[in-house]
Amino acid sequence: MSDTILRIVGVPGSPYSRKLRAVLRYRRIAYAWVALGSAEHRTLPRPKVELLPQLIMTGADGSAEALTDSTPLIRRLEALHDGRSVVPPDPAVAFLDALVEDYADEWLTKAMFHYRWAFAPDIAQAAAILPRWSMPAAPATDLDAAGRAFADRQIGRLGVVGSNATTAATIEDSYRRLLAILDSRLTGSRFVMGNRPGSADFALYGQLTQLVGFDPTPRAIALEQAPRILAWVDLVEDLSGLEPKESDWIARDEATIALAPLLQEIGRVYAPFLVANAEALARGAEAVTCVIDGSPWTQKPFPYQGKCLGWLREGWTRLAAADRATLAPVLADTGCDLLFR
């Protein structure tokens, strides 16, 4: 186990920064939070691609390097630090955990981006607050200008994540269904993956820190429909005091039942998108066009999400035949088998 204090560069408005920081807190891995744009940040190495969060780790040559992408970083931390794992030990359950994590990271973020940059009150709040996280001491005039410029840029990127007039209702309906599904799942269970959190819990938490913790429109929806979720997000923020037991993980037989509603939502919206996106990338098409939940969907192809489908399929093929046999019925019943045909 490494005794080095890790540095994580992020901002409160980044769901992936919040996801990774919450994992570090839960796993009791020593870290220092470095605000994006701060004097401390300027002394650190920069990643190849300027994404958040950035975890400063020791590279193969012994020098510090900045790494990005929360999911592989969490798996890397699993190899470096013992105890308080966020990956279930049962391979079948771990596969479901990874599938839900991917859904949260790559589909639920569409709702996060949509609500923040498609509704006037949310745009106004984000434009006012986000620049003040990275430039807290700047003059108000500079911050206001930066907020307007950032908002304009993000609004222009709505089409990249799939938010547009054609897809808006599908995104919003899916968000409301997720709130109901999570509210039901978290009735009687502290976390999605049982009475201890898995990577899926932290991925859902990361997106929900914005949807129910910051942006006014989706927060109001959650407060009316599922106030439990607002409280849950606050609790997952710091789970360093939780004392988990191995028996707290959901058992595989229970998982195929308890997670079925969430898997059904994944099969309903995320699976058809991932497959259509991959097909568009393979054809070199300029747009993804498909039907999701009975409604047309169109957006630009997203190369990273093409990789996500590849990683999910690799995970499926690595499972033992008995584990695939356990999962095959629930994947077929929920439509998630589309991902692995």
Image (cartoon, rainbow, N blue to C red):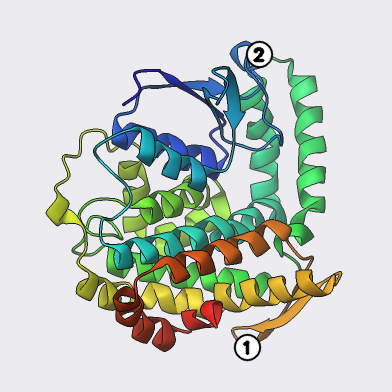
Vertical arrangement, residue 11 with respect to residue 14, above or below: above
Observer-nearest of 13 and 94: 94
Task: Using the image, tell me which numbered label, if any, was put on residue 294.
Answer: 1
Quarter occupied by residue 189: bottom left
Quarter occupied by residue 107: bottom right
Q: Quadrant of the C terminus?
A: bottom right
Of the residues shown, which amino acid type is indicated by label 1?
Answer: Gly
The residue shown at (67%, 14%) is: 42
Residue 53, horizontal then vertical, whole percent: 57, 35
Query: Mark 2 vs mark 1: which is more N-terminal?
Result: 2
Residue 301, horizontal then vertical, whole percent: 76, 65
- 136 relative position to 247: left or right: right
Q: Quadrant of the N terminus?
A: top left
Observer-nearest of 224 and 211: 211
The residue shown at (82%, 36%) is: 149
- 288 relative position to 333: left or right: right
Of the residues shown, which amino acid type is indicated by label 2?
Answer: Ala
Vertical arrangement, residue 164 with respect to residue 146, above or below: below
The residue shown at (70%, 52%) is: 117
Secondary structure category for the residue under label 2 = loop
Residue under numbered circle 2: 137
